[in-house]
Image (tube, rainbow, N blue to C red):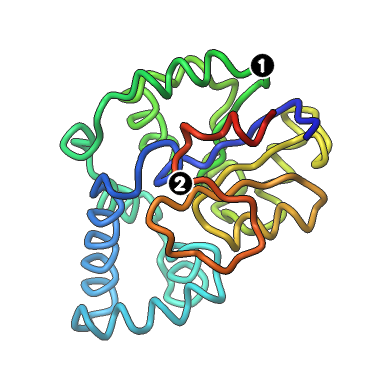
């Protein structure tokens, strides 16, 4: 695989999905949606599951269909500030990113403040050339092609030169359709049956790059 650049997703990709941070996200999202739509949590989750298939993010659905005008209120509500409660320092990850020859950036559907908070906790912020967050593409996140194209334009790479690493198959399929290389991080095996190259931990990425 001839790769000159790696775009990493952040959440549940650069740290284990078993950390509990994703569960905290989900609980906070459901609480926000329930309060905003004035629905019981169970109903809010049922509606969100349907709409997540139509939109890249819950935020996009709320903005386009439910009139949410202040995305910062959403970001503030759903992203835990105390990431150290869930995450552990990962010196293996730090050394791995230092060691791989490719240039690297983060492409996330989270806001910049969360991406900075997590990447600084993991001590990899300084190893990333860029962080492309949800605001980078006018609040349209992955799998919107614009999210990938803006990143590619900034790093001055063609899709076929780039490996995109994520924990969500539909985000990877979109990038692959553009001609890019993709790698799924699936710690729990919940995405068995996909035709994607898969590892269970970001620590295994070098096996794919060889």
Q: Residue at x 48, y 72 (%)?
A: 52
Q: Which mark is residue 83?
A: none
Residue identifier under label 2: 200
Indicate the quadrant containing the C terminus: top left, top right, bottom left or bottom right: top right
Give percent across and percent down for residue 199.
52, 45
Q: Quadrant of residue 190?
A: bottom left
Say whether disc 1 or disc 2 marks the residue closer to the N-terminus.
1
Q: Report x, y in % for residue 49.
A: 41, 78
Q: Nearer the viewer, mark 1 or mark 2?
A: 2
Residues at circles 1 and 2 in contact by the CB criterion of under 8 Å: no
Quick one: 14 or 54, which is closer to the camera?
14
- Judged from the image, the secondary structure of the residue bearing numbered disc 1 is loop
Residue at image position (46%, 53%) is 186
Q: Residues within 10 Å of mark 1 (few under 14, many from 20)?
A: few
176 vs 27, left or right, is right
**Where 54 sits versus 136, above or below?**
below
Left or right of 146, for residue 74: left
In the picture as drawn, the residue positioned furthest to the left comes out as 85
Quadrant of the rendering where the N terminus is positioned: top right
Q: Which residue is mark 1?
A: 101
Q: Crowding at label 2, few (<14), some or many (≥20) Cα neighbours within 10 Å?
A: some
Q: Position of residue 70 (x, y in %)?
A: 39, 56
């Amino acid at each position: 695989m001839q790769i000159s650049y790696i775009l990493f997703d952040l959440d549940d990709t650069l740290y284990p999905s078993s950390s509990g941070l994703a569960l905290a996200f989900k609980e906070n999202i459901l609480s926000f949606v329930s309060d905003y739509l004035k629905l019981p949590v169970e109903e809010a989750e049922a509606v969100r599951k349907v709409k997540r298939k139509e939109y890249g993010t819950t935020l996009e659905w709320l903005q386009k269909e439910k009139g949410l005008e202040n995305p910062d209120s959403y970001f503030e509500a759903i992203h835990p500030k105390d990431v150290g409660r869930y995450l552990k320092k990962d010196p293996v990850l730090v050394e791995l990113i230092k060691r791989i020859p490719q240039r690297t950036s983060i492409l996330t559907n989270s806001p910049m403040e969360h991406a900075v908070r997590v990447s600084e906790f993991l001590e990899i912020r300084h190893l990333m050339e860029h962080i492309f967050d949800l605001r980078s593409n006018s609040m349209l996140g992955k799998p919107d092609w614009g999210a990938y194209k803006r990143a590619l334009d900034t790093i001055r790479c063609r899709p076929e030169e780039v490996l995109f690493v994520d924990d969500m198959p539909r985000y990877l399929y979109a990038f692959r359709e553009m001609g890019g290389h993709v790698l799924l991080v699936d710690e729990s095996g919940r995405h068995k049956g996909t035709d994607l190259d898969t590892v269970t931990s970001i620590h295994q990425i070098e096996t794919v790059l060889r």
